[in-house]
Image (spheres, rainbow, N blue to C red):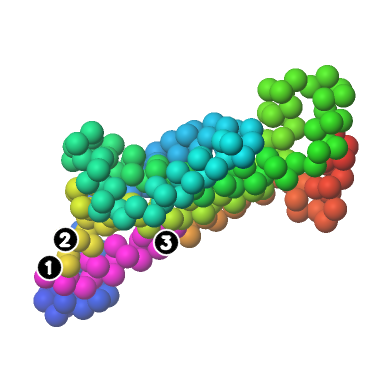
């Protein structure tokens, strides 16, 4: 009874809410993680060829960067409304919207990473017989990884937050709990879902930071990044 008192009193912090709604919180969190992961991975797959296209020159860079920027400025409600006739009230609707929002960050970071590769490194690789594809995968991409992973981190954190907007169509993960609690202002549910959303963003960022450090060990040693580039 003492535990239920916080539910009756509608306290912000309520252990009974956590105990009684544990499965609901788990399901919402898993949906949130799933939508975020699929959106970021799909966004990366779409952004990579767009960045390669933009790198070919200003004639391509202007339209690609301009389009991704315009997409990012479209309000989420308007974006979902435009996509609704194509996808209906489905998870695909939310994922597609999140992918479009992620493109501006991912494309710019991938492009910045590739353009930061020293020209002498490219020339040295070409002199060793590297073709365009091998040059990209074995030389340019490894050196562009710091910028690329930084873009993925930013896109992931922002997508964790934007996923809550999917509650408009019932596919918002933790956002569903927040929206359901707002009419009655169920404080414990609002606070718990909000805190879990923040914790997901922090955990995802730290995880990706760890992956970045594993993939780019030379960046942890002063001067080694430049030396590695010159040694190619």
What distance separates the C-alpha of mark 2 from that of mark 3? 20 Å
Q: Residue at x 49, y 46 (%)?
A: 66
Q: Is residue 82 left or right of residue 67?
A: left
Q: Write down the quadrant of residue 20 in the picture.
A: bottom left
| Residue 199 numbered mark, or none | 3
Q: Write down the quadrant of residue 48 in the picture.
A: top right
What distance separates the C-alpha of mark 1 from that of mark 2? 7 Å
Q: Are marks 1 and 2 in contact (CB under 8 Å)?
A: yes
Which element is circle 2 on?
helix
Residue under pointer 1: 183
Q: Residue at x 75, y 20 (%)?
A: 131
Q: Which residues are magenta?
A: 184-201
| Quarter of the figure with the N terminus | bottom left
Q: Are marks 2 and 3 in contact (CB under 8 Å)?
A: no
Q: Are marks 3 and 1 in contact (CB under 8 Å)?
A: no
Residue 166 appears in the rendering: no
Residue under pointer 2: 180
Q: Position of residue 67 (x, y in %)?
A: 45, 43
Asked whether 22 falls inside the magenta stretch, the response is no
Which element is circle 3 on?
helix
């Amino acid at each position: 009874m003492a535990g239920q008192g916080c539910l009756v009193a509608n306290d912000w912090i309520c252990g009974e809410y956590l105990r009684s709604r544990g499965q609901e919180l788990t399901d919402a969190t898993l949906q949130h993680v799933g939508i975020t992961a699929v959106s970021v991975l799909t966004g990366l797959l779409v952004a990579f060829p767009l960045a390669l296209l933009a790198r070919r020159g200003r004639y391509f860079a202007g339209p690609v960067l301009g389009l991704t920027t315009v997409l990012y400025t479209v309000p989420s409600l308007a974006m979902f409304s435009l996509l609704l006739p194509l996808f209906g009230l489905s998870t695909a609707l939310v994922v597609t919207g999140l992918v479009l929002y992620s493109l501006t960050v991912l494309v710019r970071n991938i492009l910045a990473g590739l353009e930061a590769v020293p020209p002498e490194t490219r020339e040295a690789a070409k002199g060793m017989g590297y073709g365009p594809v091998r040059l990209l995968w074995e030389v340019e991409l490894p050196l562009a990884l710091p910028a690329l992973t930084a873009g993925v981190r930013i896109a992931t954190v922002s997508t964790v937050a934007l996923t809550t907007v999917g509650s408009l169509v019932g596919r918002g993960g933790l956002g569903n709990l927040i929206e359901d609690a707002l009419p009655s202002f169920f404080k414990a549910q609002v606070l718990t879902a909000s805190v879990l959303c923040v914790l997901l963003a922090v955990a995802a960022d730290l995880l990706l930071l760890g992956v970045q450090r594993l993939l780019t060990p030379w960046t942890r040693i002063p001067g080694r990044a430049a030396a590695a580039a010159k040694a190619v």
